[in-house]
Amino acid sequence: VRAVDGSMVPLSSFVSVSQTVQPNGLSTFQQLNSAMLQGVPFPGRTVGEAVAFLQQKANEIMPQGMAYDFKGESRQFVKEGNTLAITFAIALLLIYLVLAAQFESFRDPFIILIGLPATVFGALFVLFILGEVNGAMQNNPPINLGSGTINIYTQIGLVTLIGLIAKHGILMVEFANKLQETKGYDKNLAIKEAAAVRLRPILMTTAAMVIGVAPLLTANGAGAHSRFDIGVVIAAGMAIGTMFTLFITPAIYSYVARDRRHMHDLEMESDVLAHDHDPVVTAPANDAEGLPKAAE
């Protein structure tokens, strides 16, 4: 570089040259500079386990003043995953209160919902099996088996199961109560008759729901895993829950349900009293010539 007096000054006196590597663009998250790390859970591990592991390691190695956050399904799990128990409890409470108002009893809703734990267990058991299959096949099975984990989509399916499986109990309990009130059956005979008569509607309801979610189980393309997760929870929960409900609900009804035969007895007594007080009309007697006798 030529100086003012005409002398040459080397460029190294003013600048230094070095080679560095810079990204093509700077990523930001919530208006802060950020770096994104992407990954998927190890086969056989759930999203919750992966999130817990990352949170532990981030707290151990990240410098002071730096923060981390999640995106996509992991962020959704962190923000909403802990609300499953609350959402499930609220939905269960609302359905219980509605049934209590409908049946005018706190016992009958308990009997109706007694098959729910077996239903949820069946759905979660199938999810566990699918997760193990995904892990054994390195998360690349020959057919779509969903994520096999508890996520927002499986949570929606579990909440949906509360209302679906309650329908089975309603069919049996309502019919058994009517048999006690109208025919004077005892509890055991009433629920036995109700289970036999309502078996076909219960199986039809289950078959309709399983067939209805079949397109979700066979879906492919974008979002197929999400739809599969909802479908498999509903289908597995309905199939397994129905088998348990057909046996558990009648057994619990025999021990817990209220004896309603007195309502039938009261109805019979009211009918008898009504007949006893009916007015009796008699015709006047006739004399020998066939003419009515004059009243004395």
Image: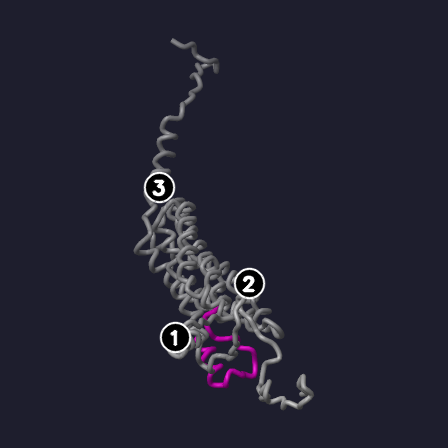
Q: Position of residue 112 (x, y in %)?
A: 40, 56
Amino acid at dot 3: Met
Q: Residues within 10 Å of mark 2 (few under 14, many from 20)?
A: few
Pointers 2 and 1 in contact (C-beta within 8 Å):
no
Query: What residue did someone put label 3 on?
Result: 263
Where are the magenta residues, as a range? Answer: 128-151
**Residue at the image point whose x is 47% and y is 85% from the top:** 136
Q: Horizontal and vertical percent for residue 107?
A: 34, 51
Query: Mark 1 sits on what residue?
Result: 59
Give the answer, above or below, for where 105 lies relative to 191. Answer: above
- Colour convention of the picture: one colour
Mark 3 → mark 1, Cα distance in angstroms: 67 Å
SS at mark 3 in the image: helix
Which picture quadrant has residue 242? Answer: bottom left
**Mark positioned earlier in the residue sequence (2 or 1):** 1
Does the magenta portion include 148?
Answer: yes
Asked whether the viewer can see residue 194, the reply is: no
User: Compared to 280, does 155 lie above or below?
Assistant: below
Of the 4 image quadrants, the one containing the C terminus is top left
Going by the numbered disc 2, the residue's amino acid type is Ala
Nearer-the-camera pick, 98 or 89: 89
